[in-house]
Amino acid sequence: MYVLMPDPEICTGCRLCEMVCSLVKNEGTITPNKAFVRVMKREVQGIDVPLICYHCEDPPCRNVCPTGAISKNMETGAVLVNKEKCIGCRVCIVACPFGAMSFDTEQHVACKCDLCGGAPKCVEICKICNPPGALKWIKAKDSPLSSEKRMRAIRKLASPKGVTS
Amino acid sequence: MKYLGWAGTILRVDLASEKIRKQELPEHLALNFIGGRGFNSKILYDEVDSRVDPFGPHNKLIFGTGPCAGTIVPCSGRWTVTTKSPTTNAFGDANSGGEWAAYLKWAGYDCIVFDSIAKKPVYLWIEDEQVELRNAADIWGLDVWDTIDAIKEEDSDVSVACIGPAGENQSNAACIMNDYTRSAGKCGTGAVMGSKNLKAIAVKGSKGIKVSEPDGLIKFIKETVDKLRTEDSWYYENLSKYGTPIYLMTLNELGALPTFNWREGWFEHALELSAETLSKKYVKKKMACNACIFHCSSYCVVEDGPYAGTIAEGVEYEATGGFGSKLGNSDLASTIAAKNLCDRLGLDLINCSDTIGWAMECNQNGLLSEEYMDGLDLSWGNHEAIMEALRKIAFKEGKLGSLLALGSRKAAERIGNEAISFSITVKGQQMGLLDPRAFWSRGLGFATSTRGGDHLRDQATAEFMFTPEESEKYVGSPMVSDRFGWQGKGHLIAWSQNIRAVNDSMETCKFLQRGSPWMWVEFPAKALRLVTGLDWTYETVQKCGERIYNVEKAFNVRAGLTRKDDYLPERFYQEALTKGPFKGIRLPKEKFDLMLNEYYIVRGWDVETGFPTREKLEELGLKYIADELGSLCKLASKPKKKK
């Protein structure tokens, strides 16, 4: 099983992930307000954070859904919405701590990232950017991101100026 | 609009009557002028008399973006603002990146045309169909960052373009800023916005842009990155890693780094200003404009020294060189602080640094009397005085502020005599930091740019990046690779100006085109094909570029400009470089004349006057312009072949 993980230290805020996501999910229309990945940009603070659905192990959106429209596929790890069962109450939007749940104002149902069926387009496009890898598609088991982050922390701590450098 | 890519609507805002009208984008405009700069130039020529007062009610301020903006075409998040410029008193435009262009497209607009003058300060609010002028009393007087913060309090998901105090005070160095740190710098467009009592344009959009070939576009991003990696890898890797500051040391080694107000081309403290020093000491992160594949912008934090606590994003070569070597200043942190101050005050840093350089050289030669100095010590390298001068320029404070806010050319005309020779401008416009004595073709580019001295209207890198065969094939002359020869330069400059006009009209970043022939020849037409679904070719886009350039030229000719305005400052003809590998080299005027003649011939313009010819204008479908210029006796006819 793979998981989608953002790395804000690498993200430069080009927003190609947003645009590509909306492009493939909206029949050829690029409109980031309908994308399932959003980059929070804070130009003055120098912050770019990709906000995604983390496909939680214990998803609050699923837990609060009154009709059982949201489920987690234990094989792929994806948390998915069944449009037939969704009644459009938006409770899942309230419950998600990351703001990752969206609402389709045309079909009047909740909608969200489906990991593109196992090959996320946002990851694909992020890979070719320079520096690559602000969005990672990694094996859930060995979690290379945490080992990479540990290495970064060690480098910072070991530098003469300490963590401030 | 039946074609994809364009939003399909031009927004027309009459500021005096507060009437807002939506006009359907005419098909012929889209197909012949592509978008952005092309639209703006055509609208300016058609609707604004070249002789109007730039600050008067009859000047228009036109914001435009192109078919690629708001899509995933690499580096496409750009927009152009066009007006009659107060710095050149002729055609003026400026181009910027960030997010604003994409937001405008997603809201459903290609262009916004502002007419007349608002009775009181206002700002424009756009949220899809809802467009309204709002009272700007509370934000008038705020600097750029505070203005954007104040507007974002209402809705954090808007993109804002605005002016700072410099624009409000109609300082000729004022630019229009967007997304905090992106600037449409040239030509004093911010001053025109200030004169219209227009503080900001806030946009939010949810309509999106439909493109013709989604899968093709995703593949196209990969193809573009691959081409850059294989055909121009040094450039791609370094621009990604360091951004434009990487040029500083390269140009210093070539003896082309403007130093002490362009007197010299080599700075002994250049290493202290280098990209490596910047990266090591100050850069915390790389940041990007919309859809960018380079990420050239550096986010810098100064942690110690007198400028501790300063942050600035997008610290470019024009900052480190402009406030550095050009002013004899080796304090890198101060250049970051100066860039930050320019962003917040809404100043064009090329204009300001050049004007301060002019003042420093005047000061050195005792040309500025004490009453002008306001107690400021404008000695080379005095960075505290540079900061103070920037504030004075933005607020037109005191006699020095009012003088420098004119820009170096108009200030020099006021002081007179020798001071004029220290103003390094073409058509009153300051140039990009690159000494034309070491790059003759850039000299021709600076001189013939339609918006005055400028390094972005052309790109002469084909000179050393193309093989003679490639030069012959694309540029039209194999001679361009001879750096200090005059032949072929006219071909090179005209050709690259045309493609640059196309870039600015599709609204893609000019950083894509450098050494890779694929970028010049294949990229523009292919991007347009994938977005619009129309059958664009290299030939058709080239034609559009040439058409746009001729419209801008015609605006200038109608304003009274002639061949004599297509010359460089005397310094480059008379004084040789004194240090570095090209010591002793100047750009002799007789050689420059030969280059200029060749350029006019390639352009199909009259060699004696620089006027366009009827034949060329009609070939480009601009008969009405030929008729108008003819009635003003500003039209030439095709030169007869010599027997």
Image (cartoon, rainbow, N blue to C red):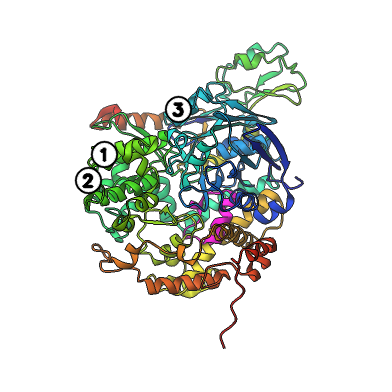
Instruction: Kindly identify which numbered label has been placed on residue A48.
Output: none
Mark 2 to mark 3: distance in Å?
31 Å
Instruction: Kindly identify which numbered label has been placed on residue B379.
Output: 2
Compared across the picture, whether B187 is left or right of B117 comes to left
Mark 1 to mark 3: distance in Å?
24 Å
Is residue B288 visible in the rendered image? The answer is no
Image coordinates of residue B141 in percent, x first then y, are: 45, 27
Q: Earlier in the sequence, mark 1 or mark 2?
A: 2
Residue nearest the observer in this picture, B464 or B594:
B594
Are the residues at dot 1 and dot 2 in contact (C-beta closer than 8 Å)? yes
Please, what is the three-letter code of the amino acid marked with disc 1? Ala
Residue nearest the observer in this picture, B438 or B574:
B574
Mark 1 to mark 2: distance in Å?
8 Å
Q: Secondary structure at mark 2?
A: loop
Please, what is the three-letter code of the amino acid marked with disc 3? Gly
Asked whether the residues under marks 2 and 3 belong to the same chain, the reply is: yes
Compared across the picture, whether A31 is left or right of B440 comes to right
Q: Secondary structure at mark 3?
A: loop
Query: Residue B504 magenta-drawn?
Result: yes
Please, what is the three-letter code of the amino acid marked with disc 2? Ser
Can you identify the residue that label 3 sits on? B141
Compared across the picture, whether B581 is left or right of B519 comes to left
Question: Which stretch appears magenta?
Answer: B497-517
Can you identify the residue that label 1 sits on? B385
Is residue B389 visible in the rendered image? The answer is yes
Q: Secondary structure at mark 1?
A: helix
Chain of the residue under the numbered disc 3 shown in the image: B
